[in-house]
Image: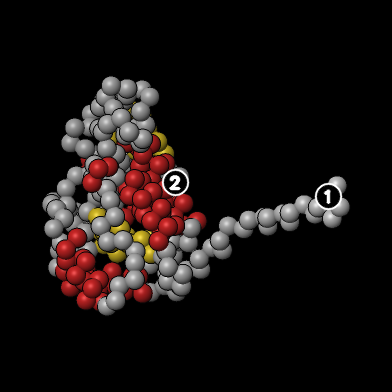
């Protein structure tokens, strides 16, 4: 997550010879990460989907575990899905990104047979992510972003879910949540930790992931058979 140049696959899908090999990969590639701004889910979902498509090993479950302390955060810039102060009217807003773009990309993962689950952890203020966003429970609520700055209020202008710089009285562009989920359907795809006590977090994630049966992988795309070559006349005509 973060700036696109830092959104990357750190531990690729591959056959590890042992649990020790996998743990070594985690220690070398994940432990050094510092959790900072920002949480650009859509770009990470695209990358994960492409990686599943190219590296998936038949017979295994496809599970995407989101570990985050935040809600979707749109990057600023000129690339796809970014907001730019130089073209505020033509850029998608943070609410467009949160309400439409992120669920769109999550839905593509669901359609590919990937089980998407969330492990929410507390942020620096001790607050866990907005679980209702991930499980589709915000249907009918509004997300509003100031038109000239893109500072947003993610949930019905409730102060606890508004950026400190969001200005209530300034023109805003609002979007209504339609109830689509980021996590997969099912009753046990969201785990929220109350603190950073690692052992309960590990147990909570383990219980969540292991609680469901296998997700059937969609059949491969069917292709029309290649036509037989044209039969030639033995006389050469």
Disc 2 target residue: 104
Image coordinates of residue 168 in percent, x first then y, are: 25, 29
**Residue beneath the point at 21% across and 71% down:** 23
In this orientation, which residue lies closer to the viewer: 106 or 140? 106
Residue 222 numbered mark, or none: none
Q: Spot the residue most to the front.
A: 235
Q: Residues within 10 Å of mark 1 (few under 14, many from 20)?
A: few
Q: Label 2 crowding class (10 Å Cα cut-off): few <14, some 14-19, many 20+?
A: some
Q: How far apart are the alpha carbons under marks 1 and 2? A: 57 Å
Q: Is residue 190 visible?
A: no
Q: Is 21 on the left or on the right of 236, as rendered? A: left
Q: Give residue 170's position: percent from left, percent from top.
A: 27, 24
Q: Residue at x 68, y 57 (%)?
A: 225
Query: Residue drawn 42% across and 48% down?
Result: 105
Q: Position of residue 206 (x, y in %)?
A: 29, 73
Colouring style:
secondary structure
Q: Secondary structure at mark 1?
A: loop
Q: Work out whether mark 1 precedes mark 2 in sequence or the reverse, and give the earlier one.
A: 2
Circle 2 — which element?
Answer: helix
Is residue 136 or residue 101 the one in the foreground? 101
Q: Is 185 in front, or is 26?
A: 26
Do the CB atoms of the residues marked 1 and 2 lie less than 8 Å apart? no
Which mark, by number, is residue 236?
1
Q: State left or right for residue 31 relative to residue 148.
A: left
Determine which quarter of the picture holds residue 155: top left
Left or right of residue 12: residue 56:
right
In the image, residue 195 above or below residue 163: below
Q: Quadrant of residue 54?
A: bottom left
Which residue does the image show at 42% across and 64% down from the upper left?
A: 56
User: For this rendering, which residue is in front, 221 or 207?
Assistant: 221
């Amino acid at each position: 997550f973060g700036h696109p140049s830092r959104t990357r696959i750190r531990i690729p899908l591959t056959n590890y010879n042992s649990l020790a090999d996998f743990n070594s990969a985690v220690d070398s590639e994940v432990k050094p990460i510092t959790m900072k701004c920002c949480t650009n889910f859509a770009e990470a979902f695209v990358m994960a989907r492409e990686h599943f498509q190219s590296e998936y090993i038949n017979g295994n479950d496809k599970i995407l575990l989101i570990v985050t302390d935040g809600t979707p955060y749109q990057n600023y810039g000129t690339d796809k899905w970014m907001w730019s102060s130089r073209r505020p009217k033509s850029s998608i807003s943070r609410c467009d990104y949160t309400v439409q773009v992120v669920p769109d990309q999550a839905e593509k993962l669901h359609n590919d047979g990937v089980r998407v689950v969330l492990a929410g952890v507390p942020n620096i203020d001790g607050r866990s992510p907005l679980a209702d966003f991930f499980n589709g429970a915000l249907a009918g609520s509004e997300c509003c972003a100031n038109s000239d700055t893109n500072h947003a209020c993610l949930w019905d202008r409730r102060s606890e879910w508004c950026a400190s710089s969001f200005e209530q009285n300034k023109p805003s562009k609002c979007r209504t949540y339609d109830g689509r989920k980021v996590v997969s359907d099912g009753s046990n795809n969201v785990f929220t930790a109350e603190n950073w006590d690692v052992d309960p977090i590990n147990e909570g994630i383990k219980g969540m992931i292991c609680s469901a049966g296998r997700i059937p992988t969609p059949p491969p795309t069917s292709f029309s058979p290649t036509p037989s070559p044209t039969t030639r006349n033995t006389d050469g005509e």
